[in-house]
């Protein structure tokens, strides 16, 4: 069993297909297939069930944690003995990040040109990003994790601001002179992020604490699209701060003060001192 075989195994797991793994590793697909077959022969087990998308066998799932640990240890060892950082930094991102992320990434790449930065979003937003950090698929991630205390994570606060309520132009509550309660809004048709996203988690928790329920009729992963959908009269919604709102959309005051959207830069405790990760968090903290 060789390190490059484990790297190939992890690439297939992370990318989902042999073709995507080949692109990531800068090799042809046949090289990925032959490397995985060689690894399976050396271990005496099948690691994937072949199909349109390769699925891990029981043996493959058992190999995954130690494989990540071995590849991570090799990468950390290489970084520790080199004066110039190299390798890969895997960054998880959300659709809306309240900071100049392109500038941060540009400065990092200028300071450490031999580090290959890979960025990826996840289908369930922060929930999937946190799980990817725990599993070793990501090194750092921008996440919204309200109310979560996880000893395996290191969280650096970015912002904590109140969510903004959006009402369509002709909504009957738009002219209310009193702050609106959650009970006033419970029967409305809602536009929100899918479950797992930080802003959705904040709102769901607030309604649950109030003993209320609501109907989310339209789920959109990109918060930037919510204002236009509300303006079109398709429902009401909450918006993270900093996203432009059309002038026809109303943003009334709320009677509750616990609808805050938090954003963090997260990494894991066992990865935070890895040189490429520490260089990124140090640059962020500047």
Image (cartoon, grey):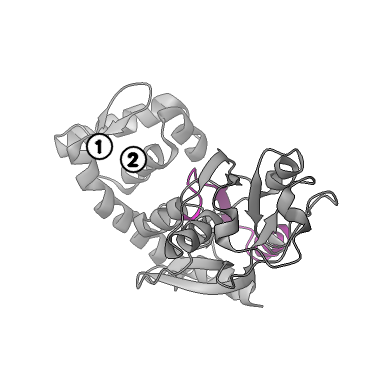
Percent position of residue 268, x then y: 41, 67
Residue at 70%, 43% in the rendered image: 225
Which stretch did the figure color magenta? 102-126
Percent position of residue 120, x then y: 54, 47
Which one is in front, 231 or 109? 231
As for residue 70 lying within the magenta part, the answer is no
**Is disc 1 in contact with disc 2, using a CB cutoff of under 8 Å?**
yes
Residue at 26%, 31% in the rendered image: 48
The earlier-in-sequence mark between 1 and 2 is 2
Query: In the drawing, what numbered circle is on residue 199?
Result: none
Along the horizontal axis of the image, is 90 left or right of 32? right
Residue hosting label 1: 39
Q: Is any atom of residue 167 visible in this view?
A: no
Residue at 32%, 53% in the rendered image: 68
Whole-Å distance between the Cαs marked 1 and 2?
8 Å
Q: How many marks?
A: 2
Which one is in front, 209 or 218? 209
Q: Element under label 1?
A: helix
Question: In the rendered image of this protein, does residue 105 appear above or below residue 193?
Answer: below
Query: In the drawing, what numbered circle is on residue 9?
Result: 2
Which one is in front, 232 or 129? 232
Q: Is any atom of residue 66 visible in this view?
A: yes
Question: In the rendered image of this protein, does residue 46 appear above or below residue 4?
Answer: above
Residues packed near mark 2 inside 10 Å, few (<14), some (14 to 19) or many (20 plus): many
């Amino acid at each position: 069993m060789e390190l490059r075989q484990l790297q190939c195994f992890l690439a297939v797991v992370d990318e989902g297909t042999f073709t995507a793994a080949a692109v990531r590793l800068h090799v042809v697909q046949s090289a990925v297939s032959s490397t995985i077959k060689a690894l399976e022969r050396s271990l005496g087990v099948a690691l994937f069930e072949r199909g349109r998308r390769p699925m891990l066998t029981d043996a493959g799932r058992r190999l995954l944690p130690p494989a990540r640990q071995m590849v991570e240890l090799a990468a950390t060892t290489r970084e520790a003995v080199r004066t110039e950082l190299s390798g890969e930094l895997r960054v998880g991102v959300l659709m809306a990040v309240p900071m100049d992320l392109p500038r941060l990434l540009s400065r990092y790449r200028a300071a450490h040109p031999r580090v290959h930065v890979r960025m990826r979003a996840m289908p369930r937003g922060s929930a999937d990003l946190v799980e990817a950090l725990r599993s070793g698929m990501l090194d750092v991630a921008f996440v919204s994790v309200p109310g979560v205390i996880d000893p395996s994570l290191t969280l650096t606060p970015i912002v904590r601001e109140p969510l903004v309520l959006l009402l369509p132009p002709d909504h009957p509550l738009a002219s209310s002179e009193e702050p609106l309660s959650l009970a006033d809004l419970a029967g409305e048709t809602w536009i929100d992020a899918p479950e797992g996203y930080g802003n959705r988690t904040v709102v769901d928790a607030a309604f649950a604490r109030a003993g209320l329920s609501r109907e989310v009729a339209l789920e959109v992963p990109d918060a930037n699209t919510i204002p236009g959908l509300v303006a079109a009269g398709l429902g009401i919604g909450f918006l993270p701060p900093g996203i432009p709102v059309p002038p026809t959309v109303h943003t009334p005051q709320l009677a509750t003060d616990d609808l805050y959207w938090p954003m963090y830069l997260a990494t894991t405790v066992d990865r935070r001192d890895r040189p490429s990760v520490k260089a990124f968090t140090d640059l962020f903290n500047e």
